[in-house]
Image (cartoon, grey):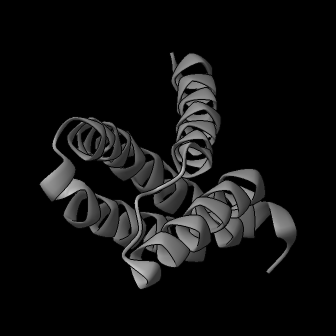
């Protein structure tokens, strides 16, 4: 199988990944708002974000979205450290999550423009 056929075969999987990514973006944004607005729910919200980022980090690179995967992994590790310490999350953790959201939004928007 040549690379062109492999790329063609991955296209439906990439499209599904980007569809799921759109919902993940909404879920992460909601959980960031919860983490910032409701202190007793901060660690639960960060745990949900960490789980989503873990899945994205494991899948994105395989599908050619290396930057998204790297951003997801960095934010996941930052969250993991906060959760292990049961400490108040520093602003840097939220900045990493927002960096991930911005990078993933850029990719999903590019894909929407390309398919329109």
The x and y percentages for residue 68 are 66, 52
Q: Nearer the viewer, residue 80 or 87?
A: 87
Asked if residue 101 is positioned above or below residue 10 in the image, the reply reads: above
The foreground one among 33 and 69 is: 33
What is the x, y in percent for residue 106? 62, 28
Q: Pick whichever, 115 or 46, lies toward us.
A: 46
Vertical order, 77 against 39 (above or below) = below
Q: Residue at x 33, y 37 (%)?
A: 29
The quadrant in which residue 69 appears is bottom right
Question: In the image as oriented, which residue stretches furthest toward the right?
Answer: 2
Q: Is residue 15 left or right of residue 70?
A: left
Residue at the far front in the pictured view: 87
Residue at 53% x, 47% y is 97
Residue at left 31%, top 69%? 47
The quarter of the rendered structure image containing the N terminus is: bottom right
Q: Report x, y in % for residue 98.
A: 54, 37
Q: In the figure, is residue 97 to the left or right of 40?
A: right
The count of marks equals: 0
Tell me if 56 is positioned left or right of 106 in this view: left
Picture residue at 33% right of the left edge, 42% below the top: 32
């Amino acid at each position: 199988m040549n690379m062109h056929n492999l790329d063609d075969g991955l296209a439906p999987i990439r499209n599904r990944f980007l569809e799921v990514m759109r919902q993940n973006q909404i879920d992460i944004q909601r959980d960031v708002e919860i983490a910032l607005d409701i202190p007793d729910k901060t660690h639960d919200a960060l745990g949900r974000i960490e789980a989503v980022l873990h899945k994205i980090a494991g899948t994105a690179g395989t599908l050619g979205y290396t930057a998204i995967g790297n951003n997801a992994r960095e934010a996941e590790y930052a969250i993991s450290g906060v959760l292990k310490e049961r400490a108040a999350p520093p602003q840097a953790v939220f900045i990493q999550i927002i960096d991930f959201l911005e990078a993933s939004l850029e990719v999903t928007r590019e894909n929407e423009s390309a398919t329109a």
